[in-house]
Image: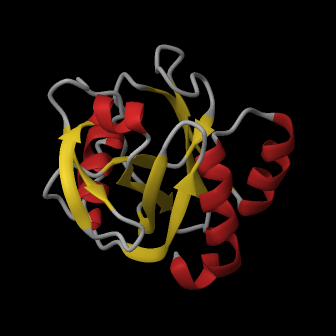
Amino acid sequence: MEHDDAAEYMDIVDERDEVIGRDTRARIHARHDIHRGVHVFVVNAAGELLLQRRARTTRDYPRHWDASAGGQVAAGESYEQAAVRELEEELGCPPGPLRLIAKYDSFSVRQREKRALFAHACDGPFSPSPHVEAVRFATPEEVVRLLAAEPFTEGFRRSFALWLPVRDAAG
């Protein structure tokens, strides 16, 4: 989700994911410091994955398909707390249990992020934020086909590759 970078503080972490400092989102990204982020895959009762299309006005990856919800972990916040917050902010998603799928390094030219990927079982209803252009459920097989035809974020591609082999057990 897009935020006021000047006011948003995040923890800086080391390679072991231990907090070593704190600064604004803008400065952390400018220095390429390691920080924390989350992706949440919302899965319905039919086993379909909720995809989010980012709005054309988003700074990074406009109009790209992405994880159901995701974002940065705020300073002092846990991965789980950030996941719950992002589900509410981006989707207006009803709360419920989260299942940790994986933690991995999402390092790119844009950012260096320690990311936690969660699954959340939910059929809706959803009230997407203005930063979300569209949402749609798709079977895992449909997502594989869409990956070849539609623009997706790099982060989604990494998270999907981790979720796909465990999807039945993970929800």
Q: Is residue 96 above or below residue 156?
A: below
Residue 167's place in the image compared with 135, above or below, is below
Residue 119 relative to residue 3: left or right: right
Q: Residue at x 60, y 23 (%)?
A: 63
State whether residue 95 is above or below residue 51: below
- Residue under the point 78% across and 34% down: 150
Is 15 on the left or on the right of 93, as rendered? right
Q: Quadrant of the N terminus?
A: top left
Q: Is residue 137 visible?
A: no
Residue 131 screen position, x and y as percent: 40, 25
Residue situated furthest top in the rendering: 57
Identify which residue, 89 or 6, lies in the foreground. 6
Q: Which residue is located at x 22 percent, y 65 percent? A: 78
Q: Count of labels shown?
A: 0
Q: Quadrant of residue 77?
A: bottom left
Image spot of residue 118 (x, y percent): 43, 67
Residue 116 in view in this figure? yes
Residue 8, image x, y percentages = 19, 34
Q: How is the image coloured?
A: secondary structure
**Image location (x, y in percent) of residue 93:** 31, 50
> 108 or 144, which is in the foreground?
108
Horizontal side, residue 154 vs residue 11: left or right: right
**Residue farthest bottom in this picture:** 169
Which residue: 41% across, 48% down? 70
Whether 131 is drawn above or below 19: the answer is: above
Quadrant hosting residue 167: bottom right
